[in-house]
Amino acid sequence: MTSGIDISVDVGPLRLKNPVMTASGTFGYGREYESLVDPNLLGAIIVKGISLKPRAGNRPPRIVETPCGMLNSIGLANIGLDAFMEDMLPWLRSLDTEVIVNIYGHSVTEYRELAGAFKGVEGISALEVNISCPNVERGGMAFGTDPGMSGEVTRRVKENTDKPVIVKLSPNVTDIRHIARAVEDAGADAVSLINTLTGMVIDIEKREPILANISGGLSGPAIRPVALHMVNQVANVTKIPVIGTGGIMDYKDALQFLIAGASAIQVGTASFVNSRTTLDIVEGIGRFCSDRGIERIGELIGSLKVGKVGN
C-alpha cells in the first residue's frame, strides 16, 4: 500500500481500513481463499449467506457464463447457522479485519431469529440482510420488491440485534430509491446495492433453459452501468452510507462507484476470474490517490460533477 495515503472509510459505525469488501456468496466463508488472498488486507469480509438451517440449494446446472458476466442459480446453499458458529466463526475471529455476516430468511420471523442468534457474539462486526428472498407468508413476493415488507424486515432485525445492519437491495424493482428510503426509515445503518439482475439463457438445440431453475441472477461487468446508476440514485436520496457492488473488475471500476457516492465497494464475480482482484483494487486505489496528490480517499467519495442539462 502506498504510504501516507489514508484510504480508510466509515460505513455507519464501522471503520474500515480500506473501502474494499468481498461480496457475499463469492468468497465462501473466507477460509476458502486463505491460501490465495491475505484477508487481513481487506476492508471487510462478507461471508456466504447464512440461514437458520442448512440448505442444499438448487439442482444443477446452476451456473452458466454469459457475455460479460454469468448467471447463477445456486439457491443460497449454505451450511446453516449452527455449523457456521461451530466451524467457521473461530477462524473468522482470528482475522484482523471486519467480518460481516449475510443473513436471509423466507419469513420475518426467520430474519428476526437469525439476527438474535448473533447478538453479543464476538468477532462479528455487522449483519448484511439479503431481502431478495421470497416471502412465503405473502405468496412468494420478494421482500426487497415492496417498501413495506423491506421496512418490516429491517425493523425486526434492528430490534433484535446489537450489530450494525446493512440491507442489501434488489435491482429488480421499479424504483430502488423507494426501497432505500423505506429501510433507512426503518433504522438501517447502511445499504448495499445492487444484488443480481434476473435473467435466463436458452439452449437452442434442446429448446430448454440451461439453468435447471430456469432463471438466475446475472452478475459481472454486464450489470456495472446499471449498478453504478442505482448507487448514484440512492446516494442522492439517503443519508446513510451506500456500499456499491455490481461488475467491479478493477480499481477504476471501484473508483467510479466511490465518486458516484458509495462509501465502500464489494467485489464479487471478479474473484472467480482473478482471486487477487480485491487486493489489486486496494493497491490500485492507493496508487491513484498518490499519483494525484489525494491524501484521503474521502476526497473522492461523492465527488461526481454533474453539469447542467445540455452542456
Image: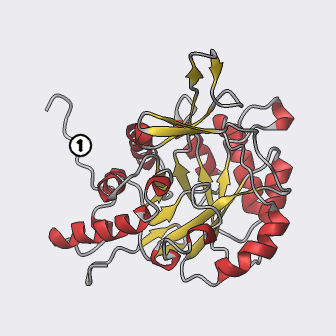
Outermost residue on the left side: it is 311
Residue at 58 percent across and 21 percent down: it is 203
Residue at 39 percent across and 44 percent down: it is 228
Where's the N terminus, which quadrant?
bottom left
Horizontal placement of 101 versus 205: left or right?
A: right
Horizontal placement of 123 versus 26: left or right?
A: right
Q: Position of residue 172 (x, y in %)?
A: 57, 33
Using the image, determine if residue 236 lies above or below residue 262: above
Horizontal placement of 145 versus 225: left or right?
A: right
Which residue is nearer to you in this view: 236 or 123?
123
Horizontal placement of 187 versus 15: left or right?
A: right
**Label 1 sits on residue:** 306
**Residue 173 appears in which quarter of the rendering?**
top right
**Residue 196 appears in which quarter of the rendering?**
top right
Residue at 64 percent across and 57 percent down: it is 187
SS label for mark 1: loop
Dot 1 alpha-carbon crowd within 10 angstroms: few under 14, some 14 to 19, many 20 or more: few
Q: Position of residue 118 (x, y in %)?
A: 77, 70
Residue at 20 percent across and 73 percent down: it is 290
